[in-house]
Amino acid sequence: MPLNRRKFLERSAAAGAGAAVAGSAAAPASAAGAREQERGGGRGAKRYSFTVMGTTDLHGNVFNWDYFTDREFDDKAHNDVGLAKISTLVDRVRAERGRGNTLLIDAGDTIQGTQLSYYYAKVDPITARRGPVHPMAQAMNAIGYDAAALGNHEFNYGIPVLRKFEEQCDFPLLGANALDAKTLRPAFAPYSMHRLRTPCGRDVRVAVLGLTNPGIAIWDKQNVAGRMVFPGLEEQAAKWVPRLRSMGADVMVVSAHSGSSGTSSYGDQLPYVENAAGLVAEQVPGIDAILVGHAHTEIAEHFVTNRETGAQVVLSEPLKWGQRLTLFDFDLVWGRGRWTVERVGARVLNSNAVEEDPRITRLLGDEHRKVVAYVNQVIGTSVAAMTTAEAAWKDEPIIDLINHVQAETVRAALAGGEYGALPVLSQASCFSRTAAIPAGEVTIRDAAGLYVFENTLEARVLTGAQLKDYLEFSARYFVRTAPGAAVDPSQLTNADGTPDYNYDAVSGLVYDIDISRPAGSRITGLAFEGAPVDPAARFVLAVNNYRASGGGNFPHVAGAPQVWANSEEIRNTIIGWVQSEGTVDPAVFASVGWRLTREGVPVF
């Protein structure tokens, strides 16, 4: 049994007798945390204030560094990233409020996303005998996190890596709706209970309930099938919130790796909502605040009215990668033998307003330098420079490179077998609009930058008719634009919030996307080897496991026959291909297979 799971069970058993769960009771609060004043509760009412700080979607960011560009992180808004920045903000809040008057939690997606986190999962894995301690565990332990919910990307590297990370953390990983598939009991700690000592002589008990995303069952099917199941957030919150209240929780905080919008990207493949945080607030009474994650949006403060009680529940989502820190500020009043939340609000702090904490940068300096050296290894050369800057609306050679490598890999794997004679197509998305292959030397970070996710490759068989449906679904990504109207590329994509990673370009076919037509009727001139595609013809589609498992809810592919799959990450397949070829020459693989049109006239 992992160490922290055992510690949780021991502390849970003790909780009924008044012990603190998931950590010792907080130090005595400073006078700043309590107020004896006349404000609604009568003269001399006992009052106490404290703050819950929150992060989410850290995605392996410790330093304000972009390992794909090999320089400090920057974006158009001049955001900064990383736990070293968060640590400085946390220290300032603790100094202002008194450490005993604060808690620090996270809402998931911690160990995937940067080459730093990848290195310690795959290159120098934490699971090795006498392996290293994960940099995210080191940093979060040093900063003093009290609890963290599981995110869906925690499962990308498999259960053993996640369990080892859990063991290395000094705080519990929470997932009330991550259940053992056989026993249907929690596979991780469902909650943590924290006791804050007040100058009033009456401790405050704060429960943190962790909820993760049901989509894990789709997106990481190969890692969790038969081992874990992930029921809906609302269902599990309705089970645990009253239980935690009955255990004496004065304050109920939910840390949910789930957006607030009530939408899903997996359609009817699961009977649960992906972005359910708002629904939890609305449907489950007894919650005071929800730290929201998963959606990579910024919500400083948002109130949802609970349908049963009429109470206002505050939601906050700090921006991803450590760009923001949420502060939930609670004011409590003592009366009738218990603490009651009188007011709670939320706001966010921007990490670009502070310097990195030298304590954290010194702690992980060696790990950072190892990864920088690793990603800068030269693996080949390129005849020409390629970039994804316009790949979201043009068929660019750099995306053709991904598709070429995938199709070639699948074709070789199927050669001589039952499906070896079928034509092989491939899908790829523009994951980053800043990825580039330079002319000249190509490094690991250049190749890895094309594929920032840990997806693996599969082969599925689809018919021509199914591929037409697939392409129509993908083409929803473009904003409908009338013939003759001005075209602004910055306003042309992401229709209805469709992210870049849910637009697929399919190589091996030729087709136009008429953006003057409504979504669902845009694909024209669909052809294979110069002839219109036969709806009954069969094709092999080289496809990443996220899409093949139903990610993005594309039609047909999740139910299509799987004829090959492997566990090698596509990113590593691309790196290996460059190393093997030695030279990257767009003349070998680049072609214009698709284009945007309006009534037959090319847009570009």
Image: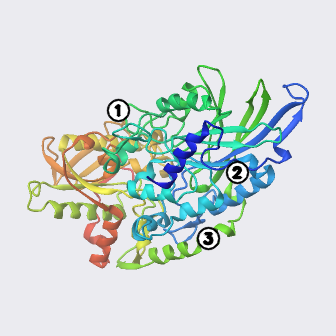
Mark 2 and mark 3: Cα distance apart in space: 24 Å
Q: Amino acid at mark 3?
A: Leu
The reply, left or right, for residue 472 in relation to residue 388 is left
Q: Position of residue 374 (x, y in %)?
A: 45, 76
User: Around disc 2, counting alpha carbons within 10 Å, would you say few (fewer than 14), some (14 to 19), or many (20 or more)?
Assistant: some
Whichever of callouts 2 and 3 sits on the residue coming sooner in the sequence is: 2
User: Around disc 1, counting alpha carbons within 10 Å, would you say few (fewer than 14), some (14 to 19), or many (20 or more)?
Assistant: few
Whichever of callouts 3 and 1 sits on the residue coming sooner in the sequence is: 1
Q: Which color scheme does this rendered protein use? A: rainbow
- Is 273 rendered above or below residue 22? above
Q: Position of residue 71 (x, y in %)?
A: 56, 71
Residue at 33%, 62% (x, y): give it.
Answer: 569
Asked if disc 2 and disc 3 are in contact, CB closer than 8 Å, the reply is no
Q: Position of residue 481 (x, y in %)?
A: 43, 41
Dot 2 corresponds to which residue? 349
Q: Secondary structure at mark 1?
A: loop
Q: Amino acid at mark 2?
A: Leu
The answer to which of 382 and 501 lies nearer the viewer is 501
Residue 429 in which image quadrant: bottom left
Mark 3 and mark 1: Cα distance apart in space: 46 Å
Q: Secondary structure at mark 3?
A: helix
Q: Amino acid at mark 1?
A: Asp
Dot 3 corresponds to which residue? 363
Q: Position of residue 63 (x, y in %)?
A: 59, 66
The reply, left or right, for residue 317 in relation to residue 59 is right
Dot 1 corresponds to which residue? 268
